[in-house]
């Protein structure tokens, strides 16, 4: 039976395999479904557009034929024989005119012809002959009324000279026709009560070369369009519009429902695609949005007015057109859902089968006692599980070997290594500790570490463990300390202890590395005694000897031969060198012991450097070089001990003088970045520092070329002392060098933000 994934086990490999399989299946199904749906939609729209295009062009041809028929009718009417008779009767009428040749008689004959045409064309509402004489008088007129076709008596005829369509007709040439704008029919200057939207088909009437009138057919515009639409009866929504935006909407699917509107109507609300189509300059165009898919064909109904056109539009609701695609999408989603459920079941079963060996292997490893290698791991399998088992087995061997090596190191290391818990309980005690303290490991492990300390130190240690503050851990952790240890026999000894901290699941461990430093302490006492001896028993006689030699050089200057004088000078110089060496050794010892005292004050660094260089011009004269100081453009202040800074800078000055060629410059640059630091650089033009000596340059007694250094009077301690002094001022010393070009040593000190008040006052 398949096991369902519990919420608490969703992180297991089995659950992840199942979820991954289902997720990938869902993504694949949705991706393929979406792609298929989009392709289907696009193909459906393309096919629909092709069909709509053909159907719309056929329907447009029907409307174009209807308007051609209207133009043909007006052409026929203006050429019927009674019209010629009317023309002659108007030109020749008089008292002698026969009764059947009067304008009234010819008018009745014309009316009969008009009625014949109107019986065939139910959407013709009026046919007229309008004279071109003053005022545009109607000469003949037939109206379609509710009582039938009626000719209008002469006394009821109207003047139409002010109508726009009359003006267009009067301007037409022979053989031309004009179709007017759609307007409501007007009688005697007012809109007719029936408010019929009307177009007029107009053609000039010419007899014997004389254009004396125009023939006008009034057409019920929407009635004519509706008649054509019902004859075609399309299953899709048919919209017929014109350049002005007037439209007729025929919905055959809704039982032939018709909606009409003129642009000038207050209730005008055209479909959204009418305006884009009317603005389009294309003879055919398409329109697709979220609700409609439409095809447009432009029909020019008046060849003499290119801007006058009919727009024939077939419109299909997008939802109806894509209904099959949506159904296919729903089927795809259903199939995807079934596929996902099926994959979930298969994935659960497959994941359970795939991970079963892993679970068995985990159980074997968990049941194996600490320090032993698991047995019966599937190392003979030739799949990933076999690789994992073999890797785990190899890891176990490496861990055991590493543990053995670590144990061997702990057992043989000369330093004592001890681990204790947060409560001070000893957890491990290596053999070196046993030798140092005289205890066996079994006597110490599990007991409080205070067993190894005098009572006073044990009390402080217990208090420290109880009040351990991780924020203040750096005061002890990782740093060496000198303490007093207590051996099993009750004797005490000096030891050095460094403690490190290790975080574990249930707290922290402290590891201590300790060493018996009794011998070192004895050596330190001996060294202090030696330094004291050097200070009192060697420096004082050297000072006296140097003074005596100097006095002798002055008193006996004129009484000595050259050889004796050279021996005296050599003795005086060697005595000075020895005194310098003794002073440097004493300074190094003070620095190492932390006994040197610094008298800190805030000084303007450019002035201080200038003073020091000026006081030691003798170095420049002695070695034949020139000192040049480049001060900072603005005052810069640093906090330091001026005497010790003088000692550090003179060491750099002395080295630069010794190794610079005669006649060259030693340049002192003081630079301030205006914010945090001041840089003092000493640049010489010497041979540079050998590459193999660069790592050792700040070590004690370091000399790149001992013969050169001896000839120059160096001790090899100057740079080491300089570095220690500058670091005491929170500064740094660095250098750059290039062979046969020169070397630059740089001192960088923190800058003080403001000048001290006492200096400003002075």
Image (spheres, grey):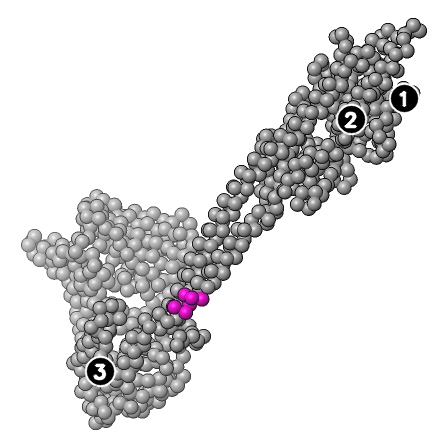
* Residue 6: % across, % down: 44, 76
Q: In the image shown, does 572 or 7 lie closer to the viewer?
A: 7
Labels 1 and 3: the sequence-earlier one: 1
Q: Quadrant of the C terminus?
A: bottom left
Q: Which residue is mark 1?
A: 153
Q: In the image shown, does 590 or 116 lie closer to the viewer?
A: 116
In the picture as drawn, the residue positioned furthest to the bottom comes out as: 489
Callout in the foreground (1, 2): 2
Q: Is residue 187 magenta?
A: no
**On residue 118, which mark appears?**
2
* Real-space Cα separation, disc 1 to disc 2, in angstroms: 18 Å
Picture residue at 88% right of the left edge, 15% below the top:
104
Residue interval drawn in magenta: 341-346
Picture residue at 79% right of the left edge, 11% below the top:
84
Say which quarter of the image contains residue 541: bottom left
Say which quarter of the image contains residue 653: bottom left
Say few, some or many: other residues with alpha carbon within 10 Å of mark 1 (under 14 / 14 to 19 / 20 or more): some
**On residue 372, which mark appears?**
3
**Looking at the picture, does residue 189 appear above or below residue 619?**
above
Labels 1 and 2: the sequence-earlier one: 2
* Residue 351: % across, % down: 35, 70
**Looking at the picture, does residue 451 appear above or below residue 357?**
below
Callout in the foreground (2, 3): 2
Identify the element where label 1 is drawn.
loop
Q: Quadrant of the N terminus?
A: bottom left
* Residue 646: % across, % down: 30, 59
Identify the element where label 3 is drawn.
loop
Query: Does residue 352 show up?
Result: yes
Labels 2 and 3: the sequence-earlier one: 2
* Real-space Cα separation, disc 2 to disc 3, in angstroms: 116 Å
């Amino acid at each position: 039976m398949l096991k369902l994934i519990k919420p608490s086990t969703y992180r297991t490999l089995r659950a992840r395999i199942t979820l991954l399989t289902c997720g990938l299946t869902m993504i694949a199904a949705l991706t393929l479904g979406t792609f298929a749906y989009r392709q289907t939609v696009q193909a459906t729209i393309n096919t629909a557009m092709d069909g709509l295009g053909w159907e719309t062009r056929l329907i447009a041809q029907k409307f174009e034929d209807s308007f051609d028929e209207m133009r043909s009718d007006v052409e026929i009417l203006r050429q019927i024989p009674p019209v010629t008779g009317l023309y002659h009767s108007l030109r020749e009428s008089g008292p002698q005119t026969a009764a059947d040749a009067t304008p009234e008689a010819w008018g009745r004959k014309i009316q009969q012809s008009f009625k014949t045409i109107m019986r065939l064309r139910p959407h013709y509402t009026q046919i007229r002959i309008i004279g071109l004489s003053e005022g545009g008088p109607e000469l003949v007129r037939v109206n379609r009324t509710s009582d039938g076709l009626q000719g209008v008596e002469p006394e009821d005829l109207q003047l139409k000279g002010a109508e726009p369509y009359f003006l267009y007709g009067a301007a037409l040439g022979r053989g031309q026709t004009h179709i007017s704008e759609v307007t409501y029919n007007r009688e005697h200057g007012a809109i007719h009560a029936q408010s019929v939207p009307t177009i007029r088909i107009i053609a000039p009437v010419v007899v014997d070369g004389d254009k004396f009138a125009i023939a006008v057919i009034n057409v019920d515009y929407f009635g004519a369009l509706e008649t054509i639409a019902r004859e075609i009866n399309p299953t899709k929504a048919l919209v017929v519009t014109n350049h002005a935006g007037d439209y007729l909407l025929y919905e055959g699917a809704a039982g032939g429902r018709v909606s009409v509107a003129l642009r000038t109507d207050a209730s005008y609300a055209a479909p959204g695609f009418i305006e884009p189509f009317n603005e389009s300059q294309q003879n055919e165009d398409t329109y697709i949005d979220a609700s409609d898919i439409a095809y447009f064909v432009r029909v020019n109904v008046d060849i003499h007015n290119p801007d006058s056109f009919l727009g024939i539009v077939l419109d299909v609701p997008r939802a109806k057109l894509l209904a099959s695609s949506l159904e296919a999408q729903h089927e795809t989603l259903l199939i995807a859902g079934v596929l996902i459920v099926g994959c979930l079941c298969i994935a659960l079963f497959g994941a359970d089968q795939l991970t079963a060996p892993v679970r068995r292997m985990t159980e074997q490893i968990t049941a194996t006692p600490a320090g032993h290698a698991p047995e019966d791991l599937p190392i003979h399998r030739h799949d990933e599980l076999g690789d994992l088992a073999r890797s785990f087995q190899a890891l176990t061997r490496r861990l055991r070997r590493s543990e053995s090596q670590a144990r061997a190191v702990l057992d043989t290391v000369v330093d004592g290594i001890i681990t204790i818990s947060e409560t001070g309980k000893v957890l491990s005690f290596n053999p070196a500790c046993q030798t140092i303290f005289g205890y066996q490991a079994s006597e110490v492990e599990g007991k409080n570490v205070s067993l190894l300390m005098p009572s006073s130190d044990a009390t402080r240690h217990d208090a420290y463990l109880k009040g351990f503050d991780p924020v203040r851990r750096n005061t002890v952790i990782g740093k060496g300390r000198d303490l007093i240890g207590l051996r099993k026999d009750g004797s005490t000894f000096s030891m050095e202890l460094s403690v490190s901290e290790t975080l574990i699941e249930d707290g922290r461990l402290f590891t201590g590395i300790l060493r018996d430093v009794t011998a070192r302490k004895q050596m330190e006492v001996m060294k202090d005694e030696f330094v004291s001896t050097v200070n009192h028993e060697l420096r004082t006689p050297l000072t006296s000897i140097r003074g005596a030699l100097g006095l002798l050089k002055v008193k006996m200057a004129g009484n000595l031969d050259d050889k004796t004088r050279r021996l005296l000078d050599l003795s005086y110089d060697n005595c000075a060198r020895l005194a310098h060496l003794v002073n440097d050794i004493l300074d190094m010892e003070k620095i190492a012991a932390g006994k040197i005292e610094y008298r800190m004050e805030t000084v303007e660094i450019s002035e201080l450097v200038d003073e020091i260089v000026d006081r030691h011009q003798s170095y420049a004269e002695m070695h034949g070089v020139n000192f040049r100081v480049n001060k900072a453009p603005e005052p810069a202040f640093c906090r330091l001990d001026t005497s010790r800074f003088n000692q550090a800078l003179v060491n750099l000055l002395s080295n630069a003088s010794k190794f610079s060629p005669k006649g060259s410059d030693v340049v002192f640059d003081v630079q301030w970045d205006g914010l945090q630091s001041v840089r003092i650089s000493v640049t010489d033009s010497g041979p540079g520092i050998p590459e193999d000596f660069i790592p050792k340059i700040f070590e004690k007694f370091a000399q790149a070329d001992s013969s050169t250094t001896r000839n120059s009077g160096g001790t090899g301690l100057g740079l080491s002392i300089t570095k220690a002094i500058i670091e005491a001022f929170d500064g740094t010393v660095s250098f750059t060098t290039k062979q046969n070009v020169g070397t630059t040593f740089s001192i960088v000190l923190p800058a003080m933000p403001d000048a001290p008040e006492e200096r400003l006052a002075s």
